[in-house]
Amino acid sequence: MDKRITLPLLTIITLAAAVLRFYDINVIPPGLHYDIAANTILVEDIAFRGFRPAFISAYTGKEVLFFYSAAAIFKIIGSSVFALKVTAAIWGIITVPITFFAIRQVLSHHRHSRFVAILVATFVAFSFTHLVWSRFGLRAITQPAIQTLAIGLLFKALRQEKSRDFLLSGLLIGLTFHTYLAARALPLVLIISCLPIVRAYFNESIRTQWRLPSSGHLMRFVLALIIVLMPLVLHFYRHPQEFLTRINQVGPIAGETDLIIQGVMGALGMLFVSGEPYDRFNIPDKTLFDPITASLFLLGLSITIWKMAISRKSKSIGNPINTAAMLLLVVWLPVFLLPTALAVHEIFPSNVRAFGLFPFIFVFPAIGLVTLLSPLISRCNTYKQKNRVYIFTLMTIFILTCATTAKDYFYIWAKQETQHIVNDSDLMHAAEYINSKDANYKNTYVSAIHHQHPTMAYLADRYEDIMWLRGGETLVIPSMGPILYVFPQSALPPEDWILSWESALAASPADTSGNLDFLAYHFNATADISLPEFQSIYAKFGQVAEVTGFRIPELQTDDHLNVDLRLKILNSDQSDYRFVADLVDIWGYHWSQGFNDSFQSTQWQSGDTIIARIQIPLRTGMSPGQYNLAVTIYAPSINQSLSSTSHDGKVSSTAQIGPIQVAPSTRIDDPPIPQHDRSDTFGNLELFGYDLSQHVYKPGAILPLSLYWRSINPTHQNQNVILMLDEHIIDSSEPVKGTYPTSEWTPGEIVIDHRYIRIPRETTPGKYKLGIKSSTANDSIDKIILMPIEIEKINREWKATIQENPTDHIIGNVFQLVGYNTRFDRQFSIQLNWKSLQLTDTDYTVFVHAFNSDNILIGQSDSQPVRNTYPTSLWIPNEYVVDTHSIALDPGEYDIKIGIYLPETGDRLTLKNGADTIIINDLVVP
């Protein structure tokens, strides 16, 4: 191809690419997405606030090149979303001529290199994926430009041996690591593709035949690379956890081989089978290549690999630099598919994670097309005739790809109804609405899928005054008004909460598709806010909050139980509290858990009333019946829950709410996975597994067995399940303790039968076989062995130890404190000497609390006896137990209070005089 026509053609292609990237850029894509808003804020910090990062730690980590380039634009035209998009568009546009330059350098040995290069530039200019990313304000758009320029300069340096080119290529390869996370795959490509050159250094015949880079040139390259890379290296040296933050979030973990295979197949398929499904970045499932380009790609790839295979027989290909160039193109494809192939915990395949493929992935379609044209070109006798073929082919590709991409982008992708919501347009319009209101709102509440959403942070004038209701799953009624609530389309509250708010509706505009864009409500005073009816309850959690009511909404789903809690905040707190509710059956088994932290506790104000919706999963296998909620307030950062205090002063670990009726489940999907698989038939029931975590128990201990049943056919008679240790029956009852008769089970239904079987205290230590059999009124089924069980001996004490302080306190007619000993080593410890008076099936907790002279609790120890290793249900009459408790106390005088309580409810056992504590007065800690 005549170089005299190359520049005009490349200019036309670049200008056309610019038109596509700038046309209507302020409108398409719509809205202001979370990521773009966050980028705008970060660029402002760099442009105007002196922020100079080598790597941005916020938002799971970001490379900085795009941000510095955008900051330069901000300096010129000011801060705006338009300026951010312009930055991305410029990067997208300059990639086109850079592509031409780089392909010319890499394939300079190819006799049609100029034509191949301009074809690749055309494919990039009118690539749908590249166009999409050129119009977002996101950093990935910098990777193809910098990476491609670096490769082009590197091969120019290798071929021409100019020091300046080695220096520039080193600088740009280092700069590539400042573009996007996927650029970290580049070293692997360079190492593999440079192997022919490395081999040539050790082969004298090749080394003398071909000119290779000198050590001085290589040193310049490495030095430049290190200089640019050093700020990033130093950052990760100081913050090593940030190097893998995003990789750990999206990458596979041990044992996920099947998921990795799916990721690899998805990555390969995105080329021409099925592309990225996410409509924000793609027409769902649109591949990188259309069928025609895919055919050319396969042809070009095959030809390239074939030429590499015969390179030893060809002098031109035998050049190690030429071989390295061909190897680079072939290796480029699998290496830069790895980032999306391994990102199995995000949407995959992902165009942005495969963005490193650009533009070299288009070399193969170009080579394939040139191969098909070669017979025609060879028949041309003059350069003029050849140029006509080149120009006609190029213009055909130009028109077809430009028109197709323009149609796909502006008339298909941009017109998707989902574009409004996936790009946070509702948040943008909500921010504009808030800006239009007066500044006299004492309280402004905004719901969003993210706390402190960057879209609102960038656009809202009074952002610092906004209180956040993440996900719309919480409603807050402050103690004073006026109040403004704004609920965008993406985070609407439950309808039953706002049914009676019609008179307070201030705005409800529609989006471009006619859907509700956001809701805005205005109340002058708290008293004007009406709420649904709640069932009154009371539980106080420390000095932080109290639960005052709960309700079960009428609208429920098959897989979740929705519960609304009403709480009142007593005092503001900077902890990371969340409301937690466990669904517990009447025997105390915790089936599932839900939580709500959508209104972060750092925003709580004294006097706030909070309505929190908690979604609790309904597990497959739950039987219908009555359940309770065990509610607490939990702080994940310190792994601590606030204890609950009832109206009558009883303290317990959770507030018990209920009963709640759970209906029969119709779900047979998502079957639970038992710890041990079985396939045993008991009449019309199948035992397909069981849970039993250990096989060694003490006499009197609880054997926690869960049986997984599946109904095969309708059962007209209720079945009884019998558990045995050898021939000794230890449990006999219908599944679920008879509360859900097997005659009511439907075919295919799964029921998990949790059994807490107390091993008889008189069981002789030894080895047994745990067996199960079933019977009906008319039939009995032979026993099946589940697993071996060992009963170990308990070493019991029948004589009291020496008592420094003898006592005679009888608690609950079950236990006697016969004395205690105290020690003052590094910390205060008290040895309680108990005597068991009678059997109990309850595992009680012993407490030792230390109070100062002002009756303020200073320290405590609450645990089951013998540091949680010897529960009271194992004790037998006349046995003595030594139970030691330690408390860190400063020197001084204390009152020590001792007692026993039930942890689930906080109920204490009482002494004969009615007191619930044994008090040791005026104990002096030296």
Image (cartoon, rainbow, N blue to C red):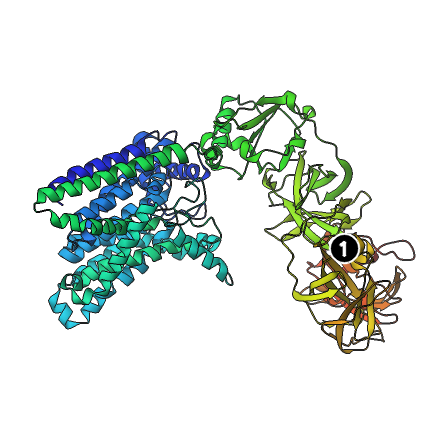
Q: Amino acid at mark 1?
A: Pro
Q: Residue at x 37, y 38 (%)?
A: 137
Q: Is residue 898 visible?
A: no
- Is 811 situated above or below 643? below
Query: Horizontally, is 19 left or right of 841 in the view?
Result: left
Given residues 22 and 582, the one toward you in this image is: 22
What residue lies at 57% left-to-right and 26% top-to-bottom?
Answer: 520
Total numbered circles:
1
**In x, y percent, where is residue 474?**
63, 37
Where is the N terminus found, in terms of image quarters? top left
Snapshot quadrant of residue 800: bottom right
In the orientation shown, which residue stands out farthest toward the right?
A: 912
* Rendered image quadrant of residue 615: top right
Determine which residue is flagged by label 1: 714
Q: Is residue 639 left or right of residue 328?
A: right
Q: Position of residue 182 (x, y in %)?
A: 37, 52
Residue 189 in view of the camera: yes
In x, y percent, where is residue 880? 83, 71
Q: Judge whether 731 appears above or below 116 on screen.
A: below
Residue located at (17% from left, 43% from top)? 390
Query: From the image, which quarter does the C terminus lie in?
Result: bottom right
Q: Secondary structure at mark 1?
A: loop
Q: Is 371 situated above or below 574?
A: below
- Outermost residue to the bottom: 766
Q: Depth check: give the residue in front, 798 or 626.
A: 626
Quarter-of-image position of residue 817: bottom right
**Residue 916 coordinates in the image, percent (x, y):** 85, 54
Above/below status of 664 relative to 701: above
Query: Considering depth in this image, is 906 or 367 the residue closer to the camera?
Result: 367
> Dot 1, how many residues are within 10 Å of its Cα: few (below 14), some (14-19), or many (20+)?
some
